Image (spheres, rainbow, N blue to C red):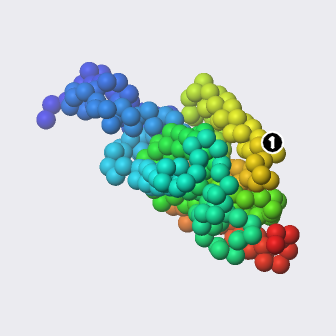
Amino acid sequence: MGDIDLEQQEPFPVDRDGNRLRRDAEQTDGGKKMGCCEKFQQSVSRWMLPEVSRSRYLERANCCPPPIFIILISIAELGVFIYYAVWKPQKQWVTLDESLWNSPLTYNPDKRHEAWRFISYMFIHAGVEHIFGNLLMQLLLGIPLELVHKGFEVGMVYLAGVIAGSLASSIFDPLSALVGASGGVYALIGGYFMNAVVNFREMVPLLGVFRILAIVLIVGTDFGFAFYRRFVNQNEGLQVSFVAHFGGIVAGMTVGYVFFSDYNKKLLKDPRFWICIVGFLVFFLFAVLFNIFISPAS
């Protein structure tokens, strides 16, 4: 076999550690044009992962299976909203209706012994702007996150935010009801935000600034609506808690950060994972005891 002229060979694209990357140009190996899926995956890798993790993700990335968890949960939430808005005798398209409190899904402090309500409240929304905002955020952020981290991780973070939101509300705003999936949405936002901050230099700094500013703007706007619903727009004495937002984002910045920062690593071997699990269980146990023995809710 003759000698190979290395100077005439096209160099492989590598990252800063010398690992081979897929091409960022319009062609893949073999001279074929990249398809829509490959282009989308490259964009996802730049938005969701630090540079050191992108090559491994792109080596095995594909669009199958699709991000099934976030799509199914969104369809379920939209379906419940349409059910109460169209088939039930109430005007739920614009604002929260009194009869919605009779739903077995709503978290009602007077019925907190029905434990499923601490999770099922995420399917009930206080109007069009409420569900539209939640669905928009969880689809725009949840689909790329699930493509990278798969449905189990995203599902655990989302549900951790939902549970943390309702438990926090039952402790810090115990006389208020609770509706909406904001706890789960804020958990996704919190986990992604922490990774964007910690890996700021490796996630395209200019886009990193845009990401952080966009998150701050969206969170601030949504908190504004939540405060308005809680303290200003109190129809017939009804109060919708905003504390679930805080519980969800704290869950995201702790549990979510650990799940989303451990791409391609053994999560069970990460001590941060066990610290978060123990912390969450301690909070869960305290919240249960508080609701049984201390809560001022009748």
**In percent of the image, x 81 and y 42: which residue is there?**
232
Residue matched to label 1: 232
Q: Quadrant of residue 161?
A: bottom right
Circle count: 1
**Residue farthest along the front direction in this orientation:** 89
- Between 84 and 169, the one lying in front of the other is 84
**In percent of the image, x 45 and y 37: which residue is there?**
44
**Residue farthest along the bottom direction in this orientation:** 293
Q: Residues within 10 Å of mark 1 (few under 14, many from 20)?
A: few
- Between 127 and 90, the one lying in front of the other is 90
- Asked if one can make out residue 273 in the rendered structure from this viewpoint, the answer is no
Residue 127 in the image, given as x and y percentages of width and height: 61, 44
Which quadrant does the C terminus fall into?
A: bottom right
On screen, 214 above or below 90? above
- Asked if one can make out residue 200 in the rendered structure from this viewpoint, the answer is yes
**Residue farthest along the top direction in this orientation:** 8
The amino acid type of the residue labelled 1 equals Val
Residue 148 in the image, given as x and y percentages of width and height: 46, 47
- Between 158 and 178, the one lying in front of the other is 178
Q: Is residue 217 left or right of residue 157?
A: right
Residue 46 in the image, given as x and y percentages of width and height: 49, 34
- Between 27 and 152, the one lying in front of the other is 152
**In percent of the image, x 38 and y 28: which residue is there?**
24
SS for dot 1: loop
Residue 150 in the image, given as x and y percentages of width and height: 45, 54
